[in-house]
Image (spheres, rainbow, N blue to C red):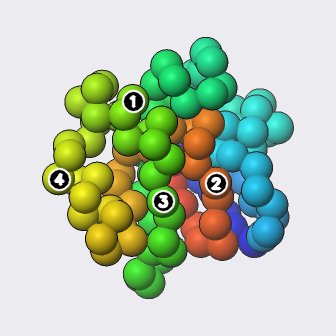
Amino acid sequence: MANVTFSSPKMKKDMTVYATAGDCSTLLALAKQHKIPVEFECENGECGSCAVKVEILSNKQPMGVHLTEKEKTVLKLAGKITKAQIETAEVTDIPPLWRLACQFIVRNEDILVKF
């Protein structure tokens, strides 16, 4: 299981929820399930409205988390990540800070999601 803490000025306080290990749901699906107000429009990785900052809350090496092609394109066009950050993520398996909630699959590690 992973603890996922959502933090936003839109919320009265931070909220931590549990993501079940092995569940292939997206971060956006988890937020919707717990009524956390992450903005979204298309839910398909094409608009970028669900861009969030994801920080790993453990001292361990982050688990390899690939960026989808949609994430690469949308986050790069939005100015959230650079081509160099994409290349670094692909080579080192260290994910960039910005992700799309509709594309990000929660792994078995505690994270902080800022939006």
Q: Are marks 1 and 3 in contact (CB under 8 Å)?
A: no
Q: Are marks 4 and 2 in contact (CB under 8 Å)?
A: no
Amino acid type, mark 3? His
Asked where in the image residue 35 lies, by quadrant, the reply is top right
Question: What residue did someone put label 2 on?
Answer: 105
The numbered dot on residue 84 is 4
Q: What residue sits 65% from the left and 26% below the top?
A: 43
- Give the CA distance from mark 4 to mark 3: 15 Å
Q: What residue sits 23% from the left and 54% below the top?
A: 85
Q: Residue furthest front?
A: 69
- Give the CA distance from mark 3 to mark 2: 10 Å
Label 2 packing within 10 angstroms: few (<14), some (14-19), many (20+) = many
| Mark 3 or mark 2, whichever is nearer to me | 3
Amino acid type, mark 4? Ala
Residue 75 percent coordinates (x, y): 35, 34
Check the picture and name the quadrant holding the N terminus: bottom right
Ranked by sequence position, the earlier of labels 1 and 2 is 1
Question: What residue did someone put label 1 on?
Answer: 74
Question: What residue did someone put label 3 on?
Answer: 66
Amino acid type, mark 1? Val
Amino acid type, mark 2? Ile
Q: Which of the pair 113/69 is nearer the observer?
A: 69
Residue 33 percent coordinates (x, y): 82, 38
- Give the CA distance from mark 4 to mark 2: 23 Å
Q: Are marks 1 and 4 in contact (CB under 8 Å)?
A: no
71 with respect to 103 (left or right): left
- Give the CA distance from mark 1 to mark 2: 17 Å
| Mark 1 or mark 2, whichever is nearer to me | 1
Residue 45 appears in view:
yes
Q: Give SS at disc 1.
A: helix
